[in-house]
Image: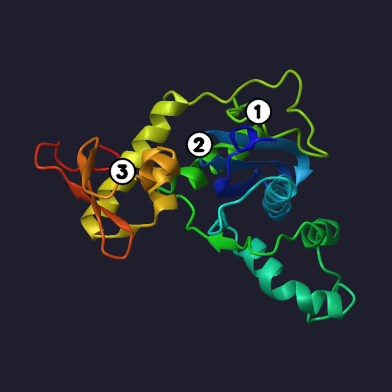
Amino acid sequence: MTPDQSPPRVVAAACDGACSGNPGPGGWGSLLRFEDGSVQEFGAADPATTNNRMELKAALVLLECLKDLPCHPSLTIRTDSRYVIDGFSKWMVGWKRKGWRTASGSPVLNRELWEALDRARLPGVPFSYVKGHSGDPDNDRCDAIAVAFAKGGRPALAQANPKVGPVPGLSPSPVGAEPVLEPAPLALGQLLSRLELADRLAAGGYSLSLVELAQLVQVPMKQLAEKVTAWTWRDWRVLPNADGRWRLERDAAGSEPMIPGT
């Protein structure tokens, strides 16, 4: 395989789970974002499950996909589930030492999923926390996928990268299920979330890594890496920091900062 034929690196990954009733009907959603700007999304429903099981399933699918894909060195899997993060990075060592029992002696719930996660563990690819419903575009998208499946819908999933094959054990969405109605076209809703996030980043003076900037503006990292001076994205100036990061500043010619919900 020549370099031009090799799959692009994964630069961002996110996952989320949802459940109606807990236990009850559930769904999960995951996505991979590639260096060439393409996105691959995954998701499915479970008629009787829990929120924690859906969070674990969403994370497991990403690990199973990533083992066969080139990854950016700074890649993390972003999730709003402390249960997944703490169990994967802290609690599992003690559980295994105690024969898969908790500190109180009770059997570990969802053991088969935790064991599968442990087998799929990838060195150098940790989970990182992102606050749910905070305007993070990838987390919001995974939540929308998970909720749609939990409600019996069949959300359209991005299949922009044909180099990612089918996920082992992933079943198609339920036949005959009706799609969940969206208040606005999906692409427009995602754009609005990104614009609102850009306003908050600019107002707070936050800086972004190249990977984070690529997620926000949805421009391939290779293209962004060529930029060394300030440039304009929509209503913002994108300014370089001395440490190699970037920050946003409202362009004087742009519109006034938007107020979410108005």
Which residue is rendered at x = 33% and y = 47% of the image? 197
Give x and y (percent) for residue 131. 47, 58
The residue that label 3 is drawn on is: 196
**Residue 11: assigned label:** none
Which residue is rendered at x = 84% and y = 75% of the image? 96
**Badge 1 density bin: few <14, some 14–19, many ≥20, Cα 10 Å:** few
Q: Which of marks 3 and 1 is in front?
A: 1
Depth order, front residue of 60/151? 60
The residue that label 2 is drawn on is: 36
The residue that label 1 is drawn on is: 162
Q: Do the residues labelled 3 and 1 touch (CB within 8 Å)?
A: no
- Residue type, numbered disc 1: Pro
Q: In which quarter of the image is residue 232?
A: top left
- Residue type, numbered disc 3: Glu
Give x and y (percent) for residue 56. 71, 54
Residue at the top extreme?
A: 176
